[in-house]
Amino acid sequence: MTVRRLAAEQPESFAFTPELEEIASALIAKYPEGRQASAVVPLLWETQKAAGGWLPEPALRAVADRLGMAHIRVLEVATFYTMFNLAPVGTYFVQLCGTTPCMLRGSDDLKAVCERKIGAQSHVSADGNFSWLEVECLGACTNAPMVQINDDVFEDLTPESLEKLLDDLAAGRPVKVGPQNGRHGCEPIGGPVALTDPALYAPRSKSDETSAAPAPTPGE
């Protein structure tokens, strides 16, 4: 496991907005009295979104105080889970899967696009639009290689389609979520290749059901 540290530069303070306070109250209400610490993970997630995609150190303290937890306990949670960003990210945070299935399908070529278009990992582009990070499996192995950008996944990528995707996002153009090669979900390109005999799906007659019924065992 890599060592996860807080960013060197931190804001002086962080305060819950009325909207975030409303979310916090709803999350805490899901747990029994005295168990409000159980809301720490979802509240950190909502706080990260409210803070612009990352968790500054004052935000960690604010969450701890809201939940009645020691500051170090919340820091432990935030540094354990990689879903929490401990340094600023771009408006579009690109998580590029580099695990074996994606690597075999060309994730190294996608990595080269990110390095050329955005810069080094964990570096925010000059316009603030992008940052990227290579991560472990994102669970879309059938559609490798793929990236997750904010809350959306983009699959079946090529260097060309990833570059176009980044250009479209930067220009504010609409983008298509999911597979980028025309297929639907993780279905085979060009249609199914197994169990294609229409007879397999024909309705069965009552006589077929009778003949297919198992013979009774002796004594029944």
Image (cartoon, helix red, strand yellow):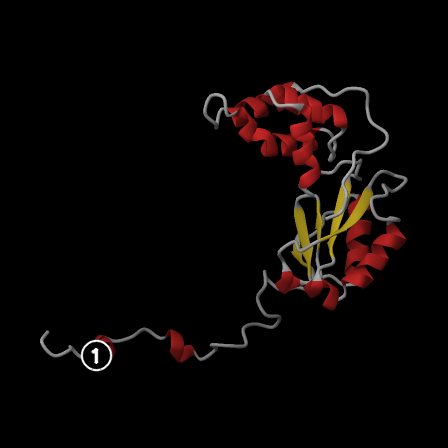
The type of residue carrying mark 1 is Ser
* Residue found 50% across the figure and 25% down from its top: 35
At horizontal 59% and vertical 62% (from top left) the residue drawn is 184
Q: 10 Å neighbourhood of mark 1: few (<14), some, or many (≥20)?
A: few
Along the line of sight, which residue is nearer the eye, 73 or 49? 73
Q: Position of residue 193 (x, y in %)?
A: 54, 77
Q: Position of residue 116 (x, y in %)?
A: 89, 54
Q: Quadrant of residue 62?
A: top right
- In the structure shown, which secondary structural element does the residue marked by tag 1 occupy? helix
Q: Is residue 218 visible?
A: yes
Q: Position of residue 177 (x, y in %)?
A: 66, 52
Placement of the C terminus among the 4 image quadrants: bottom left
In the picture shown, does residue 103 fall above or below 83?
below
> Residue 78's quadrant in the figure?
top right
Residue sitting at 82 percent across and 24 percent down? 11
Whether residue 159 is visible to the viewer of this picture, yes or no, is no
Image x and y of residue 84, in percent: 70, 38
Q: Residue at x 82, y 27 (%)?
A: 10
Viewer-nearest residue: 43 or 219:
219
- Above/below status of 206 relative to 52: below
Classify 60 as above or below 107.
above
Counting labels gives 1
- Residue identified by numbered label 1: 207
Residue 80 versus residue 87: which sits nearer the camera? 80
Q: Is residue 120 left or right of residue 77?
A: right
